[in-house]
Image (spheres, rainbow, N blue to C red):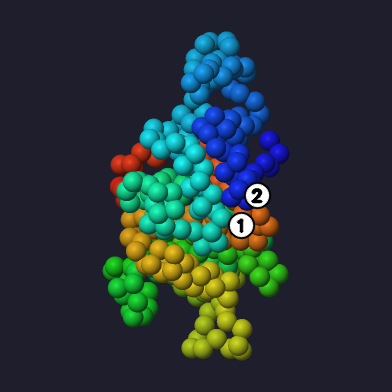
Amino acid sequence: MAEDYPRTLMELERRFRDEQACREYLFRLRWSEGFGCPRCGGRTAWPTGRGLWLCSKCRHQSSVTAGTIFQDSHLPLTTWFRAMWHVTSQKNGVSALGVQRVLGLGGYKTAWALLHKLRRAMVRPGRDRLRGNVEVDETYWGGEEEGVKGRLTQNKALIAIAAQEDGRGIGRIRLRRIPDFSRASLHGFIGEAVEAGSVVRTDGLNSYLGLVGYTHERRVLRGQPDGDEPSMPRVHRVASLLKRWLLGTHQGAVGHKHLDYYLDEFTFRFNRRKSASRGKLFYRLAQQAVQVKPAPFDSLIRPPSVGGG
Ligand SMILES: [Zn+2]
């Protein structure tokens, strides 16, 4: 469907005032090429009175939310829609406490789970990789060791960053938590984040040596960088914005085991920071929310494996 989204909160309130309106919107996002029965592939369906679609061929009843992040939620879609609006209309996002207050949700846990489910929808399935000239670097997250210098660390989360050059500015970015700074981890990250044939710029860390499939430019620093142009300014800027965001919006209260999803949210926001309309972010989030698999509560609290994809 053509990109169709509310421009303002008023418009959102008017348009999505009941479950039916929300379902119809999701229907058009999920089955943008027309309905496809999950059981028989039939192309026509009739809405039933209970918010389901009845396949005219096999009589199977489909729900537009089954198999999406909205599955099995006890929250009405009107609440989900307001949460998606709230999350995307704020430049820096919102904390679980903020969402709980604004939407009048019963408990912190509900707000927390809602936000985490939405974060799962912030990575577009099958998204393309960065290309052109791409800076790649590593950074840390973990306040308790802020003073520790160097790359050796026990309690810090390690994060790989890739930032595409866009003239003198930054294009799109990719972030991923990695288990260590080994060759396998860093090469794996680059392979996943950067299109083969691109120019990859890194610092002098030995793990980057032997990078295959890319033009590799290493910047080896001896003591201070010469000149006042910092080496790889884009990845450094991204690292500092990321830390400021984690400390600001989330007040630093982001545990390692959930960090991946915060990285996804940061990436989602960063890559759309120049978008003219916040409504467009709402649209993108809703569109991806019907494409990603459900995330039951247990999977939200279970730590993901580092570097697992
Ligand atoms: Zn069918």
Which residue occupies the foreground of this view, 288 or 215?
Answer: 288
Q: Tell whether circle 2 marks a residue whose Cβ is less than 8 angstroms from ligand 1.
A: no
**What is the CA distance from the residue labelled 2 to the residue labelled 1?**
16 Å
Quarter residue 178 falls in: bottom left
Crowding at mark 2 (Cα within 10 Å: few <14, some 14-19, many 20+): some
Query: Along the horizontal axis of the image, is 203 left or right of 253?
Result: right
Which residue occupies the foreground of this view, 162 or 54?
Answer: 54
- Where residue 248 appears, as percent x and y from the top left, is 43, 69
Which residue occupies the foreground of this view, 64 or 177?
Answer: 64
Which residue occupies the foreground of this view, 2 or 197?
Answer: 2
- Where residue 233 appears, as percent x and y from the top left, is 58, 76
Q: Residue at x 43, y 33 (%)?
A: 71
Three-letter residue code for mark 2:
Arg
* Circle 2 SS class: loop
Q: Residue at x 46, y 42 (%)?
A: 79
Residue 98 numbered mark, or none = none
Residue 293: tell me if it is visible: no
Q: Tell whether circle 1 marks a residue whose Cβ is less than 8 angstroms from ligand 1.
A: no
Three-letter residue code for mark 1:
Arg
Contact flag, marks 2 and 1 (Cβ < 8 Å): no
Q: Residue at x 33, y 80 (%)?
A: 147
- Where residue 21 appears, as percent x and y from the top left, is 57, 32
Q: Earlier in the sequence, mark 2 or mark 1?
A: 2
Quarter residue 101 falls in: bottom left
* Circle 1 SS class: loop
Residue 7 numbered mark, or none = 2
Residue wearing tag 1: 272
Establish if 250 lies above or below 55. Answer: below
Indicate the quadrant containing the N terminus: top left, top right, bottom left or bottom right: top right
